């Protein structure tokens, strides 16, 4: 099978009931990004930021996986498939995927910003929680905020440099560096495909429009079982 790099975004989990950010009624129409998704916002009001992510964690726990997560989990068991997600939810893992690259971190993990220790986040975090390693009351959700460096970029770049196919699923292509992956893959000679409710306008060889729960299982079946 060809080598494949898949990049997913909030649209993958939209039909599981988790809101996207930029669609009408999305999270950024309800919250100010600068307050809840930047290091400066966290420094100003950590209680507000924890409350925002506590609510996301509760929504995530209640959300069912969908057919698109299940299809990607099936595909991810094949060698040569690299699954990168901007999502901080755990729905791909709960659908059975292993080795998901969470470039924007994970809601289910906590991070001490004094000693960099990571551990499983409780459902409710608060500014008073002590770090289990150093004891500092400096714990934060292990998610990447605007202005911070996404995780695992070396591994992602290595996969993009030698992939045969790059597939973008349910992402608006507005947050860099993820938005640049399509050009990186194209310049390395890969074919590029977008699966999205509405085309993002990125420079893809092929775009298929529709809900992820329809498009993704169909594309995975084509890839594994033939057209
Ligand atoms: P975005 O809100 O900018 O874009 C959502 C995209 O999903 C749009 O292109 C839209 O057309 C598409 N979409 C909406 N419903 C869809 C459906 N049913 N099927 C297929 N596509 C659908 O989200 P993004 O591009 O992922 O933005 C990146 C940032 O959003 C990341 O930082 C990510 O961490 C964060 N985010 C994550 C979650 C999550 O973990 N579930 C939720 C919201 C935002």
Image (cartoon, rainbow, N blue to C red):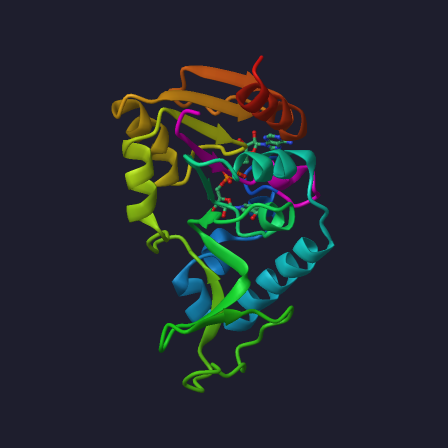
Is residue 79 one of those drawn in magenta?
A: no
Nearer-the-camera pick, 198 or 218: 218
Where 110 sits versus 83, above or below? below
Task: Report the image quarter containing ligand 1.
Answer: top right
Q: Residue at x 66, y 54 (%)?
A: 60
Locate the N terminus by quadrant. Answer: top left
Nearer-the-camera pick, 51 or 91: 91
Q: Position of residue 151 (x, y in %)?
A: 37, 53
Q: Position of residue 136 (x, y in %)?
A: 43, 84
Total residue callouts: 0
Q: Is residue 45 visible?
A: no
Left or right of 91? Residue 193 is left
Q: Residue at x 61, y 71 (%)?
A: 122
Q: Position of residue 123 (x, y in %)?
A: 65, 68
Left or right of 136? Residue 16 is right
Q: Kindly indicate the quadrant of the structure image that contains residue 68.
A: top right
Q: Residue at x 38, y 39 (%)?
A: 178
Nearer-the-camera pick, 65 or 32: 65
> Which stretch appears magenta?
1-19
Is residue 3 one of those drawn in magenta?
A: yes
Q: Kindly indicate the quadrant of the structure image that contains residue 149.
A: bottom left
Q: Residue at x 41, y 74 (%)?
A: 117
Left or right of 29? Residue 59 is right
Q: Position of residue 105 (x, y in %)?
A: 46, 56
């Amino acid at each position: 099978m060809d080598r494949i790099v898949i990049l997913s975004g909030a649209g993958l989990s939209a039909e599981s009931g988790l809101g996207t950010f930029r669609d009408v009624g999305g999270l950024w129409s309800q919250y100010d990004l600068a307050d809840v998704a930047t290091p400066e916002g966290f420094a100003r009001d950590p209680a507000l930021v924890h409350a925002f992510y506590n609510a996301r964690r509760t929504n995530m726990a209640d959300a069912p996986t969908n057919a698109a997560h299940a299809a990607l989990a099936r595909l991810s068991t094949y060698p040569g498939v690299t699954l990168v997600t901007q999502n901080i939810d755990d729905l791909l893992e709960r659908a059975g995927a292993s080795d998901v690259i969470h470039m924007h971190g994970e809601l289910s993990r906590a991070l001490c910003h004094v000693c960099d220790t990571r551990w499983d986040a409780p459902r409710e975090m608060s500014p008073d929680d002590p770090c289990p390693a150093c004891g500092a009351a400096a714990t934060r959700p292990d998610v990447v905020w605007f202005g911070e460096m996404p995780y695992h970029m070396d591994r992602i770049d290595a996969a993009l440099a030698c992939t045969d196919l790059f597939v973008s699923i349910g992402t608006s292509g507005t947050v860099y560096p993820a938005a640049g992956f399509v050009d990186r893959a194209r310049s390395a000679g890969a074919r590029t495909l977008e699966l999205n409710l509405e085309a993002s306008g990125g420079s893809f060889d092929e775009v298929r429009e529709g809900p992820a729960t329809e498009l993704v299982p169909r594309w995975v079946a084509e890839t594994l079982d033939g057209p």
